[in-house]
Every structure is written in C-alpha cells, then in structure tokens.
Image (cartoon, rainbow, N blue to C red):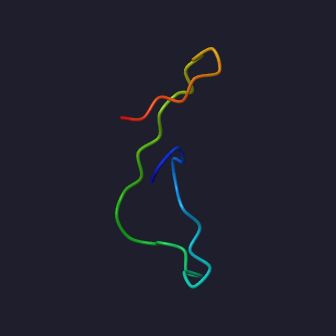
Amino acid sequence: VGNRSSEFHPEVRRVRREGSYIYEEFMPTGGTDVKV
C-alpha cells in the first residue's frame, strides 16, 4: 500500500458484527511508522 497503513473504500458501509477484533496498546515510535 505504499506508505499508507490502510485504504478507504467508500463502497463498504457495513460494520462487521461477527468475529473478533485485536486491540493493541499504542507504542511510542518517535514519529516513525511501524508495520507488522
């Protein structure tokens, strides 16, 4: 995706109700973008 961490899809308008979500703590990165 180049230098972006996500893309906007205007045609997607529904909220996912099934499955699980992963929540992680924010980490101080000194202004850098860390992708895992």
**Residue 18 percent location from the top left of the image:** 38, 70
State which quadrant residue 12 falls in: bottom right
Q: How many marks?
A: 0
Question: Which image quarter holds the C terminus?
Answer: top left
Instruction: Please name the residue shown 59% across and 67% down the image.
Output: 8
Q: Residue furthest front?
A: 2
13 up-or-down from 17: above or below: below
**Residue 20 percent location from the top left of the image:** 37, 57
Instruction: Please name the residue shown 54% across and 48% down the image.
Output: 4
Q: Who is closer to the viewer here, 3 or 13?
A: 3
Question: Which image quarter holds the N terminus?
Answer: bottom left
Instruction: Please name the residue shown 65% across and 21% down the image.
Output: 31
22 up-or-down from 12: above or below: above
Q: Is residue 16 left or right of residue 19?
A: right
**Residue 11 percent location from the top left of the image:** 57, 85
**Residue 21 percent location from the top left of the image:** 42, 52
Q: Residue furthest bottom?
A: 11
Instruction: Please name the residue shown 34% across and 64% down the image.
Output: 19
